[in-house]
Amino acid sequence: MSHTPLQVTIGFIGAGSMAEAILRGLIAPGIADPDRVFALNSQNDERLAELRNKYGIRTTRMPEERDRLISEADILVLGMKPKDAAAGIADIRHLLHPGQLIVSLVAGFSIGAMERIVGGAQPIVRTMPNTSSTIGLGATGISFSNAVTAEQKETCLTLFRAIGEVTVIGEESFDILTGVSGSGPAYLYYVMEAMINAGVEGGLSEEAARLLTAQTVLGAAQMVKTTNEWPGELRRKVTSPNGTTQAAIEVLEAGHVGDTVARAVKRAAERSREISDSLAEQAEQYGKQV
C-alpha cells in the first residue's frame, strides 16, 4: 500500500531497537521519505552505518552537523536509555525551537519532567510502545502535552500506527499501562515457556511444542480482536462441562493464577511509578541549570 510521505523532518536521538522499529514502519511503506529522516547516537558508528545502509536515512557523529539537524527537525524522537535521558535532553535544549515536537520513547519520563528540563511549554508527546512493535504488532500508549497541536497529534499517531495499535490515554494512566502492555509480553512469554516445557515433558518435540504454543497464543489473541468478545466469554465457550479445558481451568483457579497475574501487573505499575519519581528528581536537577 503506497502512502503520501509525511512532509516533516524526523530525527531519532538514540538508535536502539524501538527507534529502528519505527524507522522500518515509516520507511518501508513510504510513510516517511528517508531523505527527511536522520538518526544520531552518542558513540556507536557501526550502528549508525547499519541504519543508514538499511533504510537510506541520514546519520552523523559530527558535532556541527548533529546540532544543525537537531535544530532544523520538525520532530525529535527521544530513544535514549532512561538513566541518560535527563542529561541527554539538557544537552540539546539550546537547539530546540518553539513548536518543535518532542516525542519520548523513554520509559518513566513524565511530560512535566521533560518540560522542567527544556524550560518551557514545548510540544511533548509521551509514549510507551512494547517490544512487539519491532515486528509491527506493537501496543502503544500515548499522551500529549497541552502545547501539542491537532496537526502534530495526527502526525504522531501516524508514526505509531506504523508499528501497531495506538491508544491515547491520560498521562496519569501511564504506570498501569506499563503494567498491562509495556511489560505484558513478558508475562505471556512466561506462560508460553511453561506450556512448551509441559508439552516436551509429555512427549512432543521441542519444535512441535513451540509451534503449537505460539500459534495457540496468536490465535487466541486474534479471536479477542476479531470477535470483540470479552476473553472470559470466549473462555466459557471453549470450556465444556467436565471436559479437558475445565479440568485445566480448575487447576489454574486452585493456584490463584488470575490473582497472581493481577498482582504482577500492579507491581509492574508500582515499579514504573518508582522509576518515574527517580527520573523526576534528575529532571529537577537539570531544570535548575536552565
Image (cartoon, helix red, strand yellow):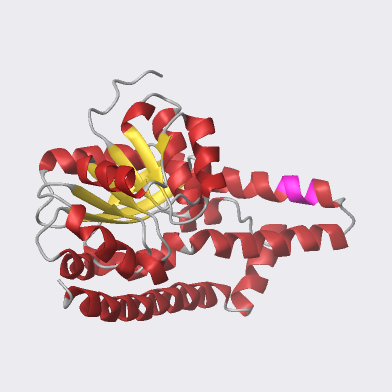
In-front residue for pair 219/214: 214
Viewer can see residue 163: no
Judged left or right of residue 183, residue 178 is left
Name, please, the residue furthest toward the right.
203
Residue at 45% x, 79% y is: 267
Instruction: Report how many numbered discs are placed on residues in the image.
Output: 0
Residue at 53 percent of width and 31 percent of height: 53
Q: Relative to 130, is 212 above or below?
A: above
Q: Position of residue 52 (x, y in %)?
A: 48, 35
Q: Main secondary structure of the magenta part?
A: helix
Q: What is the residue that sits farthest to the top in this orientation? A: 2
Q: Is residue 139 above or below residue 202?
A: above
Residue 93: x and y in percent read 20, 59
Boundaries of the magenta span: 208-212
Where is residue 61 drawn, in percent x and y?
Answer: 42, 47
31 w.r.t. 184: above or below: above
Residue in view at x 23 percent, y 75 percent: 286
Kindly identify the residue that appears in the image at 57 percent across and 78 percent down: 256
> Does 36 appear above or below 173?
above
Which of the 4 quarters of the picture holds residue 83?
Answer: bottom left
Front residue of 195/81: it is 81
Within the image, what quadrant is residue 116 found in? bottom left
Relative side of 47 to 117, left or right: right
Judged left or right of residue 170, residue 64 is right
**Where is residue 187 drawn, in percent x and y?**
56, 65
- Observer able to see residue 271: yes
- Quarter of the figure that contains the N terminus: top left
> In which quadrant is the C terminus drawn?
bottom left
Pick the residue in front: 273 or 196. 273
In this rendering, position of residue 68 left or right of residue 60: left
Q: Is residue 165 magenta?
A: no
